[in-house]
Amino acid sequence: MYLTTSRPDLTFVVCMCARYQATPTKKYLHAVKRIFKYLQGTINQGLWYPKDFSIALTAYADADHAGCQDTRRSTSGCMQLLGDILVSWSLKRQKSIVISSTKAEYIAMSGCCAQILWMRSQLTDYDLRFNKIPMYCDNKSAIALCCNNVQHSLSKHIDIIFYFNKEKVENGVVELYFVNTEYQLADIFTKALCRERIEFLINKLRMRSFTPKTLKLLADEAEE
């Protein structure tokens, strides 16, 4: 669990295993062994935070649909970036079962929006003020649900606490944008992915393999 604070590529699989830590079976222990094997091959990998980067708050929100095999609940995933630098990420199994992917994505956007508002308030202490913060989602119906109050039939089963999405969009705090699933960076927090997909997303998250040679090259680049 400690590693998940610096290794976003491990967050999903570690959280999945943690759900069964009270009564693990042989298949869960096998999954944990695979995590250690992956760590052994990527021991030098981590996030790179360069000295100079742009300060622009953006976010990605995503969800699978009924991905939990035991409860059929969906998993919400979100991440927030300052410029191109990943500074916050999380995943959480949703509290109730939803009958459509639109509702699962809508709830994920709600959690992401709440984190954005907290970060926005903290950044004001550094005299950084943000409005119209871009939040990217790969579900057009969920975006339309936030921007169009007429579509009430799609949202009548969603708890009232998630409706502050609409308020923040209307007040211009958050702006919603559609992103193709291929470039949905939060995808890594919501489901198991193939090796090629994980490697693609890890690269987009600016994770690097920090061998002594790589660190020296990065330090030289920073000095230049």
Image (cartoon, rainbow, N blue to C red):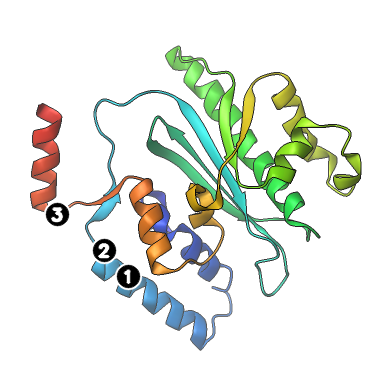
Q: Which residue is mark 1?
A: 38
Residue at the (10%, 51%) spot, across then down:
212
Query: Are the residues at dot 3 and dot 2 in contact (C-beta closer than 8 Å)?
Result: no
Compared with 47, 164 (above or below) is: above
The label on residue 211 is 3
Q: State how far apart marks 1 and 3 are (Cα).
A: 17 Å
Compared with 194, 49 (above or below) is: above
The label on residue 25 is none
Query: Are the residues at dot 2 and dot 1 in contact (C-beta closer than 8 Å)?
Result: yes
Residue at the (39%, 68%) spot, across then down:
195
Residue at the (76%, 31%) spot, across then down:
147
Q: Quadrant of the C terminus?
A: top left
Compared with 24, 122 (above or below) is: above
138 lies left or right of 12? right
Q: Which residue is mark 2?
A: 42
Q: Position of residue 24 (x, y in %)?
A: 54, 80
Q: Quadrant of residue 34?
A: bottom left
Tag 3, which secondary structure? loop
The amino acid beneath tag 1 is Tyr
**Mark 3 surroundings: few (<14), some (14-19) or many (≥20) residues within 10 A:** few
The amino acid beneath tag 3 is Thr
15 lies left or right of 142? left
Q: Position of residue 87 (x, y in %)?
A: 42, 38
Query: Are the residues at dot 1 and dot 3 in contact (C-beta closer than 8 Å)?
Result: no
Q: State how far apart marks 3 and 2 are (Cα).
A: 10 Å
Q: Position of residue 77 (x, y in %)?
A: 57, 50
Q: Quadrant of the N terminus?
A: bottom left
